[in-house]
Image (cartoon, grey):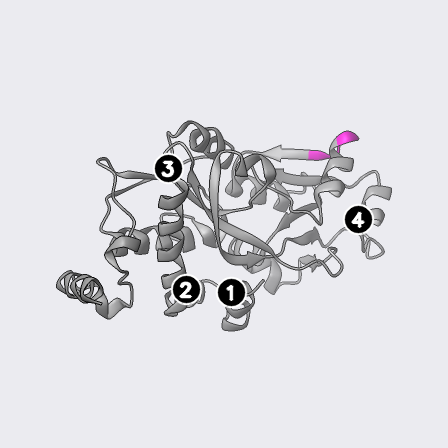
Amino acid sequence: MLDLMRSLRSCAALALLAAGSCLPAHAAPSCPARPIVVGLYEFGHFFSSGAGLDKDLAEELRKRSGCAFSLKVMQRRAIWPALQSGAVDMTFSAAPTPERLGFSWAEPYIWLKNMVVLRKDVAPGVRSMADFIAAPELRLGFGRGYAAGPAYEEFVGQLRNIGRVEDVDDGDRLYAMFKAGRFQAILAPKMAYASYLKDEIMADAVRIEDWSATRPRGPATLMLSKKRFSADEAKRWGELLKAIRADGTLQRFIERYVDPDEAVKMLAP
């Protein structure tokens, strides 16, 4: 109890207690000697034009931990080898694929579902993955370094095997090419497509459908490089992330970008 009271007094002295972020000293993340490198990538409301949920969370972790952070904007596909080598320490909104879990610790904090976003000129009878595959004129745009998620992995793989996937390096270019008709569909969660396609959604110029049947939403995680963090250190960052969620800060951040109903959905598996 004495140790806890000392920790609380220290936290108050740093003006963190009012934010609900104080953790006992033994549970707080330790700060490395150099700034923590955070890999950010352009992807709609997650991060675009210097703002987004990923940046909000990075800033909140910086504030609550007291550690120095260095934000580095990169292509998504470049983040994974950098995380593996330790050149990047952490990244956000990451799908925990088996390959990535080989070199990263993963702490889930929101749950997302990829939707199928179709151009309006796609035939109305195309209502499933099988329908899309059966129409040889239809192509899928896909971001390099992105994960389709379990519901769509086989779908993307089949299309890739028959040369009907166009891989694109960044979100801005992906959506610009989609609007220009280079391909007829993309896969994305609402946090991404709602940013890029606001006018098209309002004008009913796109169809947004869920072809994942009854599959639940999948976790998006904070990923920490195993080259830089031990399992215990990763757990401490996870506890700090849980505190941001528990005191309502995460929900407030999400509601900057989507409506409250969607924010609530994102907070539950």
- Calculate the distance from the C-alpha at mark 4 to the C-alpha at mark 2: 35 Å
Looking at the image, is mark 4 or mark 2 earlier in the sequence?
A: 4
- Calculate the distance from the C-alpha at mark 2 to the C-alpha at mark 3: 21 Å
Part of the protein shown in magenta: 161-165
Quick one: SS at disc 2? Answer: helix
Q: Are marks 2 and 1 in contact (CB under 8 Å)?
A: yes
Q: Are marks 4 and 2 in contact (CB under 8 Å)?
A: no
Q: Position of residue 118 (x, y in %)?
A: 70, 52
As shown in the figure, which amino acid type bears the numbered disc 3?
Answer: Asp
Q: Is residue 194 visible?
A: no
- Calculate the distance from the C-alpha at mark 3 to the C-alpha at mark 1: 25 Å
Residue where numbered disc 2 is placed: 245
**137 lies above or below 206:** above
As shown in the figure, which amino acid type bears the numbered disc 4?
Answer: Met
Quick one: SS at disc 1? Answer: loop
Q: Position of residue 69 (x, y in %)?
A: 27, 43
Q: Quadrant of the C terminus?
A: bottom right
Residue at coordinates 74% horizontally, 36% vertically from top-left?
A: 157
Question: Which label is found at residue 191?
Answer: none
Residue where numbered disc 4 is placed: 129
Label 4: how many residues lie within 10 Å, few (<14), some (14-19) or many (20+)? some
Question: Which label is found at residue 89?
Answer: 3
Looking at the image, is mark 3 or mark 1 earlier in the sequence?
A: 3
Looking at the image, is mark 4 or mark 1 earlier in the sequence?
A: 4
- Calculate the distance from the C-alpha at mark 4 to the C-alpha at mark 3: 37 Å
Residue at coordinates 29% horizontally, 68% vertically from top-left?
A: 20
As shown in the figure, which amino acid type bears the numbered disc 1?
Answer: Leu
Kindly report which numbered mark, 4 or 3, lies closer to the viewer in this rendering: 3
Quick one: SS at disc 3? Answer: loop
- Calculate the distance from the C-alpha at mark 4 to the C-alpha at mark 1: 27 Å
Residue where numbered disc 1 is placed: 267
